[in-house]
Image: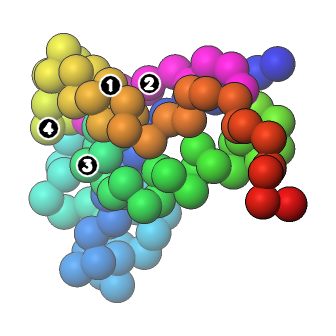
């Protein structure tokens, strides 16, 4: 089964009307881009990531989630640490129990 990557981005709603969502500026021109790569949890919050992890479970995926770090605002080490801590709170790790309420 294919490994799923945990990767995040932040949309800049001030720049989207100017540049569109397919902004082709250099990734290091963060201030003027419509979106930038962010460490997991810095682009989208827990609610979004809980939905992602829940949907992976719904379709039967129960394997590796690999953190992909391309955040130009953080070092690789800091970004990895923060992503790991964030994902610990949203990844579903245990098998569901029997649906006793059914």
- Sequence order check: which comes first, mark 2 or mark 3? 3
Residue contact between numbered discs 1 and 3, judged by CB atoms under 8 Å:
no
Report the mark closest to the observer, 4 or 3: 3
- Give the quadrant of residue 24: bottom left
**Whole-percent x, y for residue 68 in the image:** 43, 26
Is 14 in front, or is 76? 76
- Residue under pointer 1: 84
Q: Is residue 55 left or right of residue 58?
A: left
Region of the chain picked out in magenta, as a range: 62-71
Residue contact between numbered discs 1 and 2, judged by CB atoms under 8 Å:
yes
* Residue found farthest to the right: 102
- Sequence order check: which comes first, mark 1 or mark 3? 3
How many tags in the picture?
A: 4
Residue 63 part of the magenta-drawn span: yes
Q: CA distance from mark 4 to mark 1?
A: 17 Å
Report the mark closest to the observer, 4 or 2: 2
Rendered residue at 71%/37% (across/down): 96
């Amino acid at each position: 089964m294919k490994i799923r990557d945990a990767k995040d981005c932040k949309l800049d709603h001030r720049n989207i009307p100017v540049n569109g969502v397919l902004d082709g500026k250099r990734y290091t021109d963060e201030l003027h881009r419509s979106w930038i790569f962010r460490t997991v949890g810095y682009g989208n919050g827990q609610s979004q990531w809980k939905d992602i992890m829940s949907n992976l479970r719904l379709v039967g995926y129960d394997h590796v989630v690999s953190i992909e770090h391309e955040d130009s605002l953080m070092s690789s080490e800091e970004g990895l640490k923060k992503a790991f801590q964030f994902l610990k709170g949203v990844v579903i790790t245990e098998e569901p129990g029997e649906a006793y309420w059914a």
